[in-house]
Structure formats: structure tokens, C-alpha cells
Amino acid sequence: MDSRGSISKFALVFVVTATVLANAQTRKEFQFAVHRHASVSIINQYGLISVKPSNGNQVIVNAALGSDKVEVDTNQGGNHVTFVSHLLPGADANSGRVDYEVLVPADANVSLHSTTGLLHAEHLHGDLMLEGNATQVDVRDMSDGHVHVKTLDGPVNLSNVSDGHVEITSVNGNVVLTSVNGPLVSVNSTSGKIHYDGDFGEGGEYSLTTHTGDIEATAPAYASIDVVARSTQGKVENDFQLQPTHTSFALKAGSAFAGTMGKAASSVKLLSFSGKIHLKKRTQ
């Protein structure tokens, strides 16, 4: 083999190696000392954000950067810590991706925003605000704090959330609530389906509303509720024996029902324009 062939092969190996290194993720760690009820905000264009509780009064963030076309800007002002994914010229959904693994004090108030990617939070009891476009939201094992979710297309899943205000607004995404209760639980969707599986708590207000999506609410036989369900153009089904109550609208079989069970401790409204509504009795 002549020298030109050797140089050519060397050049090819160099280019491939350089490309692999350029595409490799860069990992960075950030740590900030905070006090009780700290505020933590993360704004991320592309990528996931996962938040869990830390052992002490520290905010610890491990960020995996997709390339050198994105940076993480940080700022601490008093008890408020902010992280922003800063896209540089030429960045796209791959090269501009940042995946965040975050540890915060359990009582911290957390705000997360991502255009795409997963937003995940668990075992916290501060207030939580999650916003995204084509974003999947997963919240579990939360208590006492307020949980506010706003999405366009991504699915929303909440499980084991108790004793807080829950407010969810989604345009097209499906919403699934499992063992979610509190003084206020409100879901409003334009076309997504809403599925609730719980006991409707004690003394709360539950409002599940969708324009064209279906609603399925599953509750135990011992549930204590004052319920109103109505679909203007869809079908309505009820598995429970309800004590009838007066309503401000005419009750039409198959499209609306209203009544109480037990002590009627919680108020439940299931409303859709054209979707199907089913108040379902849990069999186990």
C-alpha cells in the first residue's frame, strides 16, 4: 500500500473518531445550598427532567448535554435556583437536548418546562408546576402541595397524589389519575380522554371536563359523593344506585344523571360535549 492510501485511511479514522466524540454527551453537575421551601425552576427546550427528593438542603442537578451546541445557564437569587438550557446557533432537537436528573429538598416548590420529553416528579410535598407541548407528564407519590399541569399533546399520568390542589389543562393529551384526591381536583381537556380511578376523597371538589373526549371514573361501592354527569351529544352510563337530587337542567336518560351516595361528602362533576361518560363501580 502506498503512502497516499495510508494517509487516506488515517484521515477517515480521524473523521469518524472526531464525529463520535462530537456527538458524545457531556455531563455536568451543579450543586446549590438552599433553605426551607426553596424554589427551583428548570426551562428545557428538548429532553427529559426527572425530580426526586434529596437528603439535605441542597439542590443537585446532573445534566447530560447532547452536544456543544447547548449550554446550561444557572442562577441563584436567595432561595430561588434557576436552570435554563441555552441553545446555540445550529442546535436542533438532538444536538440541543439536555436530560436533567434533579434532587431537591422534599418541601421545595418546583417549576418544570419542556417542549418535548418527559417531565417526572415523585415523593415531594411542595408545589409543582409542569408545562410542556408534546410532553409526557408523570407525577407520583406526592402529598400536601399543589400540582398544576399544562400541556398540548402529551399524556398526563398522576398516581398516589393526596391532600393538595390538582389542576390539569390539556388540549389533546389523555389524562390518567390513579389514587388522586384532595380539596380540589380539576381536569380540563379539549379532545383527550380522562380516566379517574380512586375514591374521590373526603370533602373535595372534583371536576372532570372534556369537549370531545371520553370520561371514565371508577370508584368503590363506599364512595361518598354528590355527582352530576352530562354529555350533550354522547352516551352516559352509571353503575351505582344514586339517591336522586334536583338539578338546574333536565335529566335525560342516557345523556345525564345526578344523585348522591353515602354522606355526599365530595362534589363530583363529569362533563363532556360529545364524549362518552361512565361512572364505574370498582369490582375488587
Image (spheres, rainbow, N blue to C red):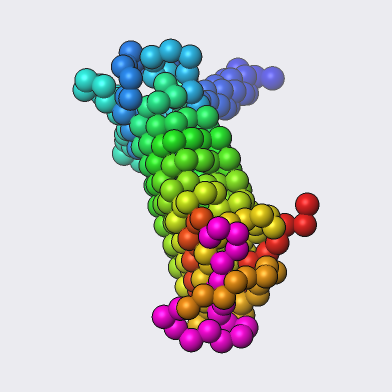
Give coordinates of residue 122: x percent, y percent.
53, 32
Residue 261 in magenta?
Answer: yes
> In which quadrant will I find the N terminus?
top right
Give coordinates of residue 200: x percent, y percent.
56, 53
Q: Nearer the viewer, residue 202 or 270?
A: 202
Give coordinates of residue 11: x percent, y percent.
55, 23
Q: Residue at x 51, y 55 (%)?
A: 265
Q: Residue at x 48, y 35 (%)?
A: 143
Q: Residue at x 40, y 26 (%)?
A: 107
Q: In the figure, 143 relative to 235: above or below?
A: above
What range is drawn magenta here? 247-264
Q: Nearer the viewer, residue 58 or 162?
A: 162
Q: In the figure, 11 relative to 189: above or below?
A: above
Q: Nearer the viewer, residue 115 or 162?
A: 162
Q: In the figure, 236 relative to 210: above or below?
A: below
For residue 62, say whether it is visible: no
